[in-house]
Amino acid sequence: LETLRVALGAGDMEQLRQLGHRMKGVGNSYGFELISILGKKIEDDAKARNLPALQALLAEYTDYLARVSIVYE
């Protein structure tokens, strides 16, 4: 999350795109579908250089991480 924030603050769309792509790829693998969904959106919005959307996505991701509970079975 902090790496995403730093990249956004620096306007580093390429790093945001890469991080979003990684999130998209690994979220479902670990049972976190929303992380994959957010990753795809971050990747797409970084390509489009859509700062307002990226800010909203980071806020959504921050909220998600604050609420998610990991259960080991």
Image (tube, rainbow, N blue to C red):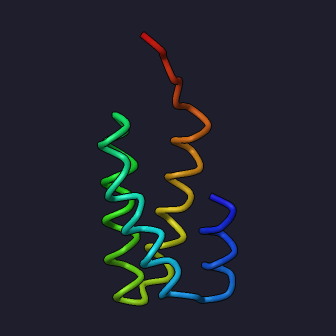
Q: Is residue 61 above or below residue 52?
A: above
Q: Can you give x and y, in whole percent of width and height, for residue 24 in the image?
A: 33, 59
Q: Quadrant of residue 11?
A: bottom right
Residue at image x 42%, y 78%? 17
Task: In the displayed orientation, state which residue is furthest to the top.
Answer: 73
The location of residue 22, given as percent across then percent down, is 41, 63
Q: Quadrant of the N terminus?
A: bottom right
Residue 55 location in percent, x, y? 54, 70
The residue that appears at 48% across and 16% down in the rendered structure is 71
Of the pair 50 and 44, the residue shown nearer to us: 44
Residue 12 higher or lower than 7, as above or below? below
> Relative to residue 22, is residue 8 drawn left or right?
right
Which residue: 56% across, 44% down? Answer: 63
Horizontal side of residue 10 vs 13, given as left or right: right
Front residue of 4/59: it is 4
The residue shown at (42%, 82%) is 46
Q: Quadrant of residue 25?
A: bottom left
Residue 28 appears left or right of 56: left
* Residue 73 horizontal/vertical position (percent): 42, 10
Give the number of marks.
0
